Amino acid sequence: MTEINEHGLPIGPVVSDWTRPPWPALKVAFETWLDDANFDPERNQCQRLSALTAHMLFARDPAVDQGGATG
């Protein structure tokens, strides 16, 4: 039987592995996205955050396409 946490969500090794965000990789993605080098002279972003994180989301959920959208 699956344990339920205080929020009514299932917990366990498989669920925890899937729901645990890849924080170190996300930290790098956010730092890259916020870096001055990611902006042109008009302050438009060169790379979208979704492009920097799409591979992490896809690895965790194949239903997420590489563009960051769900299908």
Image (cartoon, grey):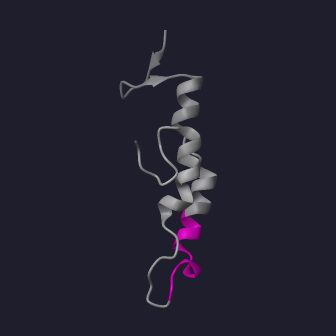
Decide: is 33 above or below 58: below
Front residue of 7/27: it is: 27
Front residue of 43/63: it is: 63
- Asked if the magenta segment contains residue 39, the reply would be yes
Decide: is 45 above or below 28: below
Report the span colored magenta: 30-40
Residue in the picture at 63% in, 53% down: 24
Q: Where's the C terminus, which quadrant?
A: top left
Residue in the picture at 58% in, 68% down: 31
Residue in the picture at 56% in, 61% down: 52
Q: Residue 67's x, y, as percent?
A: 48, 55
Specify whether 8 is left or right of 31: left
Query: Where on the picture, by quarter, is residue 4?
Result: top left
Decide: is 18 above or below 65: above
In the image, farthest residue toward the bottom = 41
Q: Residue 43's x, y, as percent?
A: 45, 85
